[in-house]
Amino acid sequence: MRLSTRSRYSIRALLDILANGGVRKPVSLRKVAERQNVSEKYLEQLFILLKKAGIVKAERGVKGGYTLGKEPEKIYVGDILRLTELDVTPVPCIGCNRIERCICKVYWDDLGEIIMGFVDSVSLEDINQRSITMGEKRRTGRDFSTVELKNEINRLKSERDAVLLVHNYQRPEIQEIADYLGDSLDLSRIASRLPQKIIVFCGVKFMAESAKVLSPEKTVLIPRFDAGCPMADMITTDELREMKKEYPNAKVVCYVNTSAEVKANCDICCTSANAVNVVESLKAKKILFIPDKNLADYVDRQTKKEVIPFHGYCYVHEFIEKWDIEEQKRLHPDARVMVHPETKPQVVKIADYVLGTNGMVNLAKKSKIKEFIVGTEEGLVARLKRENPQKKFYLPSRKPICSNMKRTHLEDVYYSLRDMKYRIEIDQKIIKKAQKALKKMIAIK
């Protein structure tokens, strides 16, 4: 994969236009070139491509220039890369005679899919919001200690009548200040019955959206606007509609790791903890299960219904390998293996327990087992160790880390509460439809 200055300067120029009012009024490309310290002619060549794709619009005249052709949250980095770079696909091995059986090619192709999945999930607005956050931190001129930050966050929570919901994969210091700590099902249920007017959700965007759907009258904040979920972005409403056309008699079970818009087009939601029960609750014989293919495979093995999967996956769990778990078993023969159902089928097959994150927390706490090999994101292990100091927990040698979950820092929570940002806004029609699917899920025991 070869990336050049073409895509970098394209994105910088688009951000410059956005920052200078280019959503509503034209911005001079000459001014953009001056501010970005790049040739105007060079930018003109790039903007020919961007204009053809509808990413920008040109306006002639003395006050002419360029405006954004789409809303900034609908302009994705992946689209810009494909337009401006010659080729963004992984380069094949040279002189390799193993062709499809080459393990290097297999992993290189997987890496290419993950990279493109990630850049396709990052919008111009995401980058803009992150740059604003970073700029505000630089302007404050004050460095808070961890203790001061926690005190300030608690003070602001009290003043704002806010509650802090934190997912199990968040950083340890974020977990420690949580009012409620849990998995997506647990936090979804809590969000629907909280008395506070403001919910600060430390997780990824689809989780905060779920909280807003269940509590539309409340203000829901996410401290990092750029904390997305690549798997959630792997399926669109158009792709779901095509699946529904192909299987008109099937019911759609939608993993909570999806956007609110996708949830609005499904019959019922589920989490990893209740997916099997949700599928069993439906009368239909055919189930469209989106978007995680691995969770779909796990559910398919637990039910007599025909489970038809989408091809999405969690890049964190996808890279937990069978050989790595087996190596941990060799190193720790007394340990029991518990893995997340988002892991690959061959990993699930050798596990002693297949559980969602809260299931793992409960097992570690209530069982007499003293050692565990944990096949999920490393953030959970911080909680497991903190709550079970007398027990031992081992991760795969290649630690599963979700970069999106790790974006949130204490400073982000502080600024979110102080400035009441970033607010989750969802169309009321989408809220109404998505709410039905989520409430059906919550009703499943």
Image (cartoon, rainbow, N blue to C red):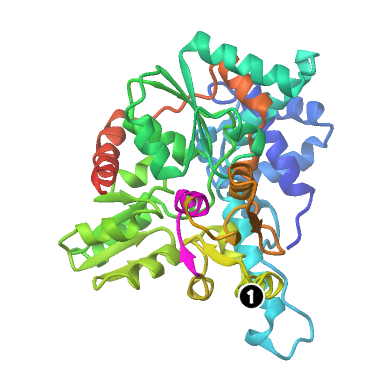
User: Residue 59: x, y in percent?
Assistant: 58, 28
User: Residue 280: x, y in percent?
Assistant: 23, 61
- Asked where in the image residue 419 lies, by quadrant, the reply is top right
Say which element carries label 1.
helix
- Classify residue 375 as left or right of residue 305: right
Taking the image as drawn, is residue 259 in sight? no
- Asked where in the image residue 393 lies, by quadrant, the reply is bottom right
Q: Which residues are magenta?
A: 352-365
Q: Nearer the viewer, residue 277 or 405?
A: 277
Among all residues in the image, which is located at the extreme bottom? 97
- Asked where in the image residue 122 lies, by quadrant, the reply is top right
**Residue type, numbered disc 1:** Glu
- In this view, 408 is above or below 263: above
361 falls in the magenta region: yes
User: Residue 182: x, y in percent?
Assistant: 48, 40
142 falls in the magenta region: no
- In this view, 362 is above or below 63: below
Taking the image as drawn, is residue 86 in sight? yes
* Residue wearing tag 1: 326
Q: Nearer the viewer, residue 77 or 445?
A: 445
- Classify residue 16 as left or right of residue 281: right
